[in-house]
């Protein structure tokens, strides 16, 4: 469920007509619904209660500081994967004890920054990283709280580019070697083991792969405890999928995911951490764009819109589907027209949808890509020197620009012509 509905024939974000935002900020723009973000976050906290738990929002899915503040104020923790994301979490007022640091390539500078600013735990992914973190923490007279990310060799049954839990993936240490790697961690003076971490992929549409991985983590918890390690927390990663196509069968609900976690891991008495990104942010955001031309091609019609692959990369990168809806509600029996919906960038990959049946649309009509809140704005670039799309947050009948569209002066001013040229 989200809060983007037609009212009086016009698509609204909560109580605000999208066409009002288009007039105020121009197109294209991302728009997020505070009520939807809040609801999706709450679904997870409700699903995990009464287990002790922390829902750490995966900042990589939607990193605007206003969104992080909204979630942080609700009590959310944050999952960060870089110095920049750590600084965003702090700028949003999230305390260090609610920030977990993930990622295969943390640098010494990133470790130092997080140890100085406060951190709940590092999710460590390799032996060299254990050694490096211990050295940094020791040099600061500290002990870094850690989990070790294990790779359970489970098929997440998702797109190959976002599956992370198979042994051929770069992530984590093989679960079969966990005992020896935990033994190394226990020997290193700058580390304090607090738990186990696992994350098998993104946009999972079934519970079975999660359950397979978590069952292995449960067994590992017992083994590691028997070897004397203190396993107080289990970080279960993110990955629960969302329904991108309204016509498809829906992925499992957070309540079902939570029930499985309680069944498989509840008896261990650990604090549960999860790192959802997409399920919180995905359906909380739209990308609104304007038709520039309706171009009749030889064997198909093209709807050329003012958003492009640099603004929403998912269709060209993963072949991802995003539902497209007109901002003016079509009459129930209005005729349909089949279009390829494309952007202005000079490559054929700049295609949002092929052979999509929509109502008849023409120049200046507004359309919206649904489910664009996750991995939309964050993956945008300025390819073709197209300014980053602004982000707008709606709450009830209020809206605010939470990231402005850069001016061309700002963009050009970043480049420097060397004196010697
Ligand atoms: N935790 C870790 C360690 C992750 O690597 C990820 C996502 C998450 C949590 C959050 O996963 P989520 O709940 O959002 O599925 N750009 C791709 C998705 C990449 C996901 C990367 N890792 C896309 O647009 O589909």
Image (cartoon, grey):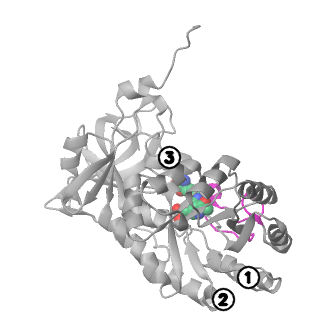
Q: Ligand 1 quadrant?
A: bottom right
Q: Is residue 212 above or below residue 360?
A: below
The answer to if 156 sits in the magenta stretch is yes
Dot 2 falls on a residue whose secondary structure is helix
Image quarter hosting the C terminus: top right
Where residue 164 sits in the image (x, y, percent)? 67, 62
Image quarter hosting the N terminus: bottom left
The residue lying furthest to the right in this view is 180
- The prevailing secondary structure element of the residues shown in magenta is loop
Q: Is residue 369 left or right of residue 124?
A: left
In the picture, the disc for residue 221 is 1
Dot 3 falls on a residue whose secondary structure is helix
Q: Is mark 3 within 8 Å of ligand 1?
A: yes
> Which portion, as a residue range, is magenta?
150-173
Upstream in sequence: badge 2 or badge 1:
1
Nearest the eye: 32 or 209: 32
Where residue 325 sits in the image (x, y, percent)? 30, 55
Q: Is residue 160 above or below residue 77?
A: above
Task: Residue under label 2, please give it.
Answer: 268
Within-10-Å neighbours for mark 3: few <14, some 14–19, many 20+: some
Q: Is residue 258 left or right of residue 72?
A: right
In the picture, the disc for residue 379 is 3
Where residue 2 sits in the image (x, y, percent)? 32, 67
Residue drawn at (34%, 35%), measured in percent from left and top?
Answer: 296
Upstream in sequence: badge 3 or badge 2:
2
Q: Quadrant of residue 220?
A: bottom right
Q: Is mark 1 within 8 Å of ligand 1?
A: no
């Amino acid at each position: 469920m989200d809060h983007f509905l037609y009212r009086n024939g016009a698509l609204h974000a909560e109580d605000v007509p999208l066409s009002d935002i288009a007039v105020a900020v121009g197109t294209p723009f991302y728009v997020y619904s505070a009520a939807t973000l809040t609801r999706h976050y709450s679904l997870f906290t409700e699903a995990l209660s009464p287990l002790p738990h922390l829902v750490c929002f995966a900042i990589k899915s939607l990193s605007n500081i206003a969104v992080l503040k909204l979630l942080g104020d609700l009590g959310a923790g944050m999952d960060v994967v870089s110095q920049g994301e750590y600084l965003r979490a702090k700028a949003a007022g999230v305390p260090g004890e609610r920030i977990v640091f993930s990622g295969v390539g943390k640098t010494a500078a990133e470790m130092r920054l997080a140890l100085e600013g406060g951190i709940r735990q590092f999710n460590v992914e390799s032996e060299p990283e254990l050694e490096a973190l211990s050295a940094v923490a020791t040099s600061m007279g500290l002990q870094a709280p850690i989990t070790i990310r294990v790779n359970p060799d489970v098929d997440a049954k998702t797109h190959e580019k976002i599956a992370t839990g198979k042994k051929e993936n770069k992530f984590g240490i093989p679960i079969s070697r966990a005992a020896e790697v935990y033994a190394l961690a226990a020997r290193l003076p700058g580390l304090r083991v607090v738990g186990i971490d696992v994350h098998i992929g993104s946009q999972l549409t079934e519970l079975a792969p999660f359950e397979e991985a978590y069952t292995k983590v449960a067994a590992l918890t017992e083994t590691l405890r028997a070897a004397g390690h203190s396993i107080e927390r289990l970080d279960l990663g993110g990955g629960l999928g969302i329904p991108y196509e309204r016509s498809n069968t829906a992925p499992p609900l957070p309540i079902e995911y939570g029930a499985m976690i309680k069944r498989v891991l509840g008896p261990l008495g650990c604090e549960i951490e999860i790192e959802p990104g997409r399920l919180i942010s995905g359906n909380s955001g739209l990308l609104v764009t304007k038709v520039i031309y309706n171009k009749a091609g030889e064997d198909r019609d093209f709807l050329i819109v003012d958003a492009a692959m640099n603004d929403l990369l998912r269709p060209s990168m993963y072949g991802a589907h995003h539902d497209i809806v007109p901002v003016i509600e079509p009459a129930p029996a209005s005729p349909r027209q089949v279009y390829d919906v494309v952007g202005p960038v000079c490559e054929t990959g700049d295609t949002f949808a092929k052979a999509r049946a929509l109502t008849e649309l023409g120049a200046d009509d507004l359309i919206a890509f649904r489910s664009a809140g996750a991995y939309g704005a964050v993956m945008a670039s300025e390819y073709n020197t197209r300014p980053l799309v602004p982000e707008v947050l709606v709450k009830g009948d209020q809206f605010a620009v939470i990231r402005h569209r850069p001016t061309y002066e700002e963009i050009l001013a970043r480049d420097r012509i060397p004196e010697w040229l």
